[in-house]
Structures are given as C-alpha cells and as structure tokens.
Image (spheres, rainbow, N blue to C red):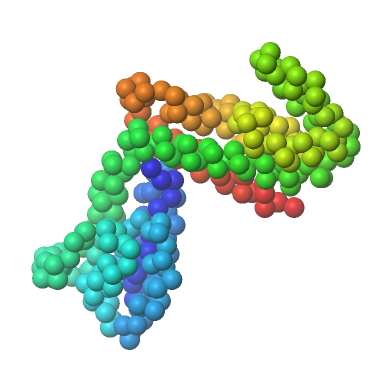
Amino acid sequence: MKTAYHILWIDDDPKSTDTDQEDVKEFLDEVGIRADITFVEAPADGSIKERLEHHLKDPDLDLLMVDYHMAGLQGDQLVRLIRETDHIYLPVIFYSSSTVSDLLNAVRTAELDGVYIANRAALIQKVRSVVGSLLVREQTVKQVRGLLMEGVSEIDTQFREIFLKVWPKLNPDQQAEVAKYLKGIVDERVKSATKRAEDFPLDSNGLGAHLTEKFLTTAYDTYTRWRLTRKILDLSGHAEECIGELKKFAEGNSDGVPLNSLRNDYAHKSRKLLSETHDLDRCISIRRSLRAQAANIDAILGSE
C-alpha cells in the first residue's frame, strides 16, 4: 500500500490538462494518497523519447496518462517505447477527444496490453476505476502491514536526525533537563534496566555522546525515542503545531488510533484478528497519518 502515486502525464497541450490533473489529485486525496504528477510536454517533432528517458528510470512510477493523438507521435508508439524499459506492466490510461470506439480499435490493432481507454470527458471516471482496482490489491492486511513497518521505521530513524539537529542548540540547563527526563524514562522500564539507569550519563557532554551513539540501537525503543524527541523540541522552542503533530504519532487524536499502536497491532496480531478492524477507512487513515508525520518531520528538519 502506498501513500503517494507517481504519475507520468504526457500531452502536447499542457494547459488542456490542468483541470484533469486537479481532478486526479482531489480523487487520490480522498483515499489518503498524494498525487505526484510529472508532466512531460510532447514536442511537435515527435522526439519524446529523449525527454522521457530520465523519467522512465524511476522505478516507483505507478501510472501513465497519455493523450493518444499527439502531434508527431501516436500513443501506441509511445507505449512500445515504455514497454522496452523496466515498466513492462505499468498501467497506461489513454484518453482522446475522439470517440472511445475509434480509440479502442486503434489499441486493438496495435495489440497493446495493460492499457485503459477513456474519452476525454470521462477521464476522471476512468482514473477512479483503474486506481480503485489497484487499491483493492494494495489494501490487504499484508500490504498495510508492510506499509506500516516501513513508514514507522522511517519516522523512527528521523527522530535521531531531529536530535542531532536540535541538541547542539540547547543550553546547558536544557541539556541537563533532558538528561533527567531521559533517566526518568529509563527508570520506568522493567527491573532489568536498573543497571543501565545507574550507569546513565547525566552530564550534557556525556549524554550527547551517548545518544549520538545509542539513539537508534536496542538501548531505546520507538516509544522512548518519540518521547525524547518531543522533550527536545519542546525545550528548543519549536512551533506548537509541529510538536502537536508529533504527539499524534503515539498519542493519537479523536480521528483514530496512533500510528505507533497501529504498527504494533499489524506487527503482532494475526490476519484474522486484524480483519475485524481492517477496512477502507482504516487504510485511508493510515495513509493520511503517515503522510502528515512525514511532512511534519521534513518541516522540522528543514527549519533553521
């Protein structure tokens, strides 16, 4: 399951696709997916292959939108070029202002596979149909489990990047407060963590070195890394909306279950148990939550 669809859109008239592109973005957003659309204008001389070479190297392409009747190049010729790359099974939606029957006949004659046909006026309906069928396969428990494992793991690793960025900006008193805070977290752990707490460095230099080395190791779990990240951001004076969004990672809100809890559920529960709550609404919620957390962390790491 994905949080973004990478779409390559090819037409010889860019302005004519503006409304269509917005419609596709709105539809995908309805199901929690960000539409990353790359538009390539087909030149009148038909030399599209050179312009596409770079884009077709992207292994994450999900969908190709093509105007069948372009100046200097027919859509079937373009698909043959694409099928010569690694995108053998990439879904292609052809659209045209001509009648659908004419377009169907052209595609049949060209013997093209993995191709969908749409009249220009009904393009968004065709996108809904094609993407909807793709989502059915992507929204199984197995696929969502994989998305959560990857998405939360990526967020988890970025907690360390936030620490490395913000820690040097804290004054000694703030660093000392972080040390006491983290020791308190360690003290909350089971009795087996007693020795670790006794050996814990409380001075700022020792703590900085310790966390730089140990932040992403088994010394700390995701929940602890999240709590520490919140504390550091709070002390550093980051915007409340950034901290508020980060809180949702493990605390959730009125809209649903927090990502960290969902990750634990999908990691440790059987498919049978998960199927009791696994539905379209949950898939949409997971995609939106992953996107929101990723965007928030990017904003934090990109701030001065």
Task: Residue 248: tell me if it is visible.
Answer: no
What number of labels is visible?
0
Q: Tell me residue 207's x, y (percent).
A: 81, 34
Give the camera-side residue of 265 and 21: 265
Q: Residue furthest top?
A: 191
Q: Is residue 66 left or right of residue 41?
A: left
Task: Residue 65: tell me if it is visible.
Answer: yes
Q: Which residue shows up at 57% across the image and 47% down it?
A: 295
Q: Which residue shows up at 58% across the image and 28% down it?
A: 250
Q: Quadrant of the N terminus?
A: top left
Q: Is residue 187 left or right of residue 154?
A: right
Q: Is residue 20 above or below residue 300?
A: below
Q: Residue furthest bottom?
A: 45
Q: Which residue shows up at 89% across the image and 37% down it?
A: 172
Picture quadrant of residue 45:
bottom left
Give the camera-side residue of 106 and 83: 83
Q: Residue furthest right?
A: 172
Q: Tell me residue 112's x, y (percent).
A: 17, 65
Q: Is residue 8 above or below residue 186?
A: below
Give the camera-side residue of 187 and 262: 187
Q: Is residue 166 left or right of residue 38?
A: right
Q: Is residue 16 above or below residue 47?
A: above
Q: Which residue shows up at 71% across the image and 32% down it?
A: 228
Q: Tell me residue 21's x, y (percent).
A: 38, 60
Picture quadrant of residue 52:
bottom left
Q: Tell me residue 182's x, y (percent).
A: 75, 27
